[in-house]
Amino acid sequence: MSAPQVRGALARLRDLGRRLRERRAADVHAALADVLDAWCAPASPWQSALADALPAVSGYSVEMVREGLARGLAPYTGSALHALVRDELGGPERQDAMRGPRVDGFACAATVLAGAIPLPAIVAISAPLALRTPVLVKPSMHDPVSAALFARSLAARDPLLGACVEIATFHRDDAESLAALCEAECVVANGSDAAVAAIGRCFEVSRAYAAAAPRRFVGYGHRFSLAMLGSDATRGGALARAAAALARDVALWDQLGCLSPLAVYVVGADRGAAGRVAEALAGALAAAEERWPRGRIEPTVAAAIARERAEAEMRDATVLAARGTEWSIVCEADAQRRGAPLHRFVRVLPSASVTTCLAALRPQGGQLAAVALAGFGADASEIGAALAEMGASRVCTPGAMQSPPLGWPRDNLRVLLPLARFGDLECE
Amino acid sequence: MSADPRRASLDARTLAWLRESPQSWRCDEARFASLALDLFAFQFQHCAPYRRFCERRGRMPERVAQWREIPAVPAGAFKEMALRSFPAECEAHVFRTSGTSGERRGALRLDTLELYEASLLAAFLRGVLPDLAPGERARIRVLAPSPREAPDSSLSHMFGVVLRELGDTASGFDVQAGALQVDGLVAALEKATADGVAVALCGTAFAFVHLLDAFAERGARIPLPPASRVMETGGFKGRAREMSRDALYQGIGHALAVAPERIVNQYGMTELGSQFYDSVLGDPGRARRKLAPPWTRVRLVDPETTGGDARPGAAGVVTIFDLANTGSVLAIQTADLGRAIEDGFEVIGREPGAEARGCSIAADEMLAR
C-alpha cells in the first residue's frame, strides 16, 4: 500500500467512524461480543481457518497453533468484553452520555502489529472498535493472516463494523507509507523498543502538520516472562504438574511471545532441586514436542541454540536437550543473566531465597511481562505483589501463561483506557 | 619460545609453516593433520576447561583420529573462562573483545606474540598486498586506534605490526582519542594522490561509515591512485547506524574511486590467531570468497545436527581450526554462519534490523540493556 493509498484508507475509515458513532455503544459492543464468542467457541470455524493459514506463513506447526489458539482465545469471550467496558470505561452508556462523565474514542486509529503471535491482533482491533474508533491495521510480515481474518469475521456479523477495519500492507522500511499511517489520530505501535521509538518519532513529526484533532500515541515494547518455583513445587506430583504446565507455556508460540517463560528460577530449595526441575522439565518438553512440534527455524536461530548449548557445556552446566534443536534446558550453577535464543530454550537457575531472586530480577523489572509462581504456599501473594511493584504486569500459575484474560494490562497499561478520551459534561 | 619442550616444538613447526612465502601457499593436508592432532593432544593436557569439555563429549586425544573430530570451543567461552594452554604466570599479553560497559569481554591470553604476528603478516600480505615485492613497503593508512591507544585490541595490534613491518614512512593511524582525524587523513590521502602513490586504506567498517559521512559533509572526494585498495573489517553490532556492505562499497567507490573488486573484507576475531581475507586481490578474476591460510581449516557445521557438515551450498556455523592458536585452543566455533564458495567461504550476515517473529526479548538484546 502506497502512502496515498494509506491516506485514502484513513479518510474512508474516518467517514465510516462517523456512521459507527451514530450507533449506540451497547449495540457495537453486542456485535463485537458475538464475534469474540464465535472465535473462542471450541469448534469455531474462524479458529480453524486461522490454524490452517498461520503455519504456512509463520513457520509454526499446525498442532501448536491449534493448541495455542484454543487456550489463548478461551478467555476472549463476549462477556469478558462487556466486563472490560464496565471496568475500564464505566459502562457503554458513558460513550453515549450527554451529561456527566463521557467517554470517546478517536476519529481513527492505526495499529502497527509485530511478530507472529495472533492473539494481540484480535485485541488490537477489538479495543478501538469498542470505543467506536475505526482502525487501520498494519500486520507483521510474519503474520499477514490473523488481522485480515478477524476483520472478515467482523464483516460477517456486522458489515459496518467489518468495514471499519482496513489492512495496510507495506514494507516496514517504507518510510512514506509509515508517515502516512502516523497521520491517524491515534497510533498504536507494537515491536522492539527501537521500532516503537521510531514510530513514535514519526507520529510526533506528523503531529506538526496534522489536523488539530485530539491525537495520541501508544507503544507496546518487547517483554519477557519467567517462572519461579518454590521448594513445594520441586518434588513428586507437584513438580510433575508444574513441569508439564511450564512445558506447555514454553511450547506454545515456540516461546516467542512475551508471555513465554525464558527461565525457571528454583528458589530457596535444596541443593538438588534445580537438577530435579531440569529433569522434569526435559521430560515434559520432550512430551510437548510430540504433541505440539516446534516450528521451523532459521539457520541463525539453530546456530544460536547450538552455541548456547556448547557454551553451557564449557562452563560445566547440565544440558538436557533434544537430539536436534527442538528443545533445550540448561541447568545453570548460578543465577547470572545469560542469552536466551528462544524457540524452546529454557534456563533453570538456582536462587538461594526469594529476596535474592527478586534482587536479581530487579534490573530487568521494566521488561518483565508475566511471572508464573508455584510452590510458595501462603507467600505467593507477597511475592506476586513484589513482582508487580517491580514491573510485572501479570503473575499467574504455571500453565496459565498463554491464556491471559482479555483485560490483561499488557505493559502495565489497561486495554481500552489508552485509546479513550474522557470528558465531563457539567451543563444542565 | 616456551620453556615446555613439547610446546616449543609445536611452536617451531607451526612457525616454520607461517614463515613460508605467502606466494607459495598450498594446502598440505597431511602436514595440517599431523600438527593439529599433536596440538590438540597438548591443549587437552594443559587446558583444564577444554579437557573437561572434550571429556563430556567423549573426544579424548586417543579417540580422535582426524582433525575434523577435534571439539570446537564456542567463542563465547572466552568471556567466561581463561582458556590458556600454558601456566598463568607465563601470560605476556591479553587481547580482549570489544563490548559495551558492563558487558563481559572475551580474552585471548598469550604467552608469546611470535606466532600471532607471523600469522597476521602472512595473511595480510596475501590478502591485501599480494603485489608487494619482497623488501618493498606500502603506503598504509589505518582507520583504527593505534596499539598505544588500545593496547588490548587485537585489531589495533594487528595494524601496528602491519605498519611496523610493511608500512612506509608516510603510513600511520588516523583515529585518535576515539575520533577519526579527518583533516589529517584528507591531507595524507591528497599527498599520496599528488605523489601518485597507491594507498592501502584499512579500518573497521564503521570507521569507513564515519569517513563517508565526513566526506559527504565536506563535499569531499579524493580519487586515489589506481593501484589503491581498501581493507575493511567488522560489523555494525551495537552501533547507532547500520549500512549494508553493498552501500558501503558503493560509498567508498564514490568517495575514493576504489572499485569493489579492490575492496577486501577481512574476517577475524580476537579469539583467533589468524585472519581470513576476501580473495579479490589475492586470487582475482574468480568469485569473491574468504581464503583460509594453509595452517587453518574452516568447517561449516550444520547447526541442526551435532557436528555434521552443512549440506553443500547450505548455511553452516563457521568453525575454525587454527594452528596459530598454540597458546589457547585451536578449534573455535564462531557465532557466525557461512556458506562454502569454491575453495573458500563467505560469511552470511544477519539482515540489518531484521523483524522479530515474536514479542519476547531475545538473547543479545536483553543482555545489552
Image (cartoon, rainbow, N blue to C red):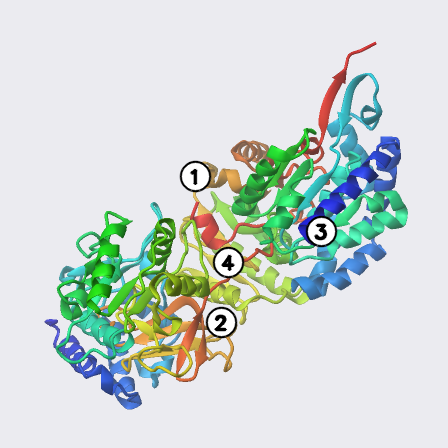
Q: Quadrant of residue A428?
A: top right
- In this rendering, would B161 be left or right of A264? left
The amino acid sitting under disc 3 is Ala
How packed mark 1 is, by other alpha carbons closer than 10 Å (few <14, some 14-19, many 20 or more), is some
B309 in relation to B264, above or below: below
The amino acid sitting under disc 2 is Pro
Determine the secondary structure under disc 3: loop
- Distance Cα–Cα, label 1 vs label 4: 25 Å
- Distance Cα–Cα, label 2 vs label 3: 37 Å
Q: Nearer the viewer, mark 1 or mark 4?
A: 4
Q: Nearer the viewer, mark 2 or mark 3?
A: 3
Q: Earlier in the sequence, mark 1 or mark 3?
A: 3
Q: Which residue is mark 2?
A: B303
- Is mark 2 in CB contact (under 8 Å) with mark 4? no
Determine the secondary structure under disc 2: loop
Considering depth in this image, is A96 or A61 the residue closer to the camera?
A96
Q: Say the numbered circle drawn on residue A356.
A: 1
Considering depth in this image, is B257 or B211 the residue closer to the camera?
B257
